[in-house]
Amino acid sequence: MSRLTKRPRVDHKAAARALREQPGVWLVVGDYRSKTSADSTVTRIRHGYPIGAREYGTPYLPVGAYEARTEPVEDGTRVHARYIGGAA
């Protein structure tokens, strides 16, 4: 049985920064093997929940400033997001 290749971790701070630099544009946040993980990430982006350890926090603030969606890809699920602005 072969192992799946390890994927690089998503740098959410860099992703949020790129989204803020291009308001209204859908950008790829990252690819996830599991649709459940991708859906959880979408929820966290939309609601500004912490991603990973609480100490890491969330770069997707203020709440409601980002939209996110998923797309099936060949080996998993891709998360896209866009910055729509919001009160700081």
Image (cartoon, rainbow, N blue to C red):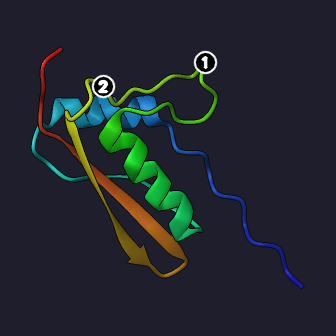
10 sits to left or right of 80: right
Q: Which residue is painted at 40% across and 77% down in the image?
A: 72
Q: Secondary structure at mark 1?
A: loop
Q: Which residue is painted at 9% across and 44% down in the image?
A: 24
Q: Which residue is painted at 64% across and 28% down in the image?
A: 53
Task: Decide which of 20, 56 is in the foreground and name it.
Answer: 56
Residue 42: give x, y in percent of width and height: 38, 52
75 sits to left or right of 1: left
Task: Decide which of 7, 65 is in the foreground and name it.
Answer: 65
Q: Which residue is painted at 52% across and 44% down in the image?
A: 10
Residue 34: give x, y in percent of width and height: 58, 68
Q: Which residue is mark 2?
A: 61
State the image quarter where residue 86 is shown: top left
Residue 48: give x, y in percent of width and height: 36, 32
Q: Which residue is mark 1?
A: 55
Q: Give the crowd class for mark 2: few <14, some 14-19, many >=20 residues within 10 Å.
A: many
Q: At label 1, which amino acid type do we have?
A: Glu
Task: Decide which of 72, 28 is in the foreground and name it.
Answer: 72
Task: Decide which of 10, 39 is in the foreground and name it.
Answer: 39
Label pair 2/1, CB-CB below 8 angstroms: no
* Quadrant into which the N terminus falls: bottom right
Label for residue 77?
A: none
Q: Is residue 33 above or below residue 48?
A: below
44 sits to left or right of 66: right
First of labels 2, 1 by sequence position? 1
Q: At label 2, which amino acid type do we have?
A: Leu
* Quadrant into which the C terminus falls: top left
Q: CA distance from mark 2 to mark 1?
A: 15 Å
Residue 67: give x, y in percent of width and height: 22, 47
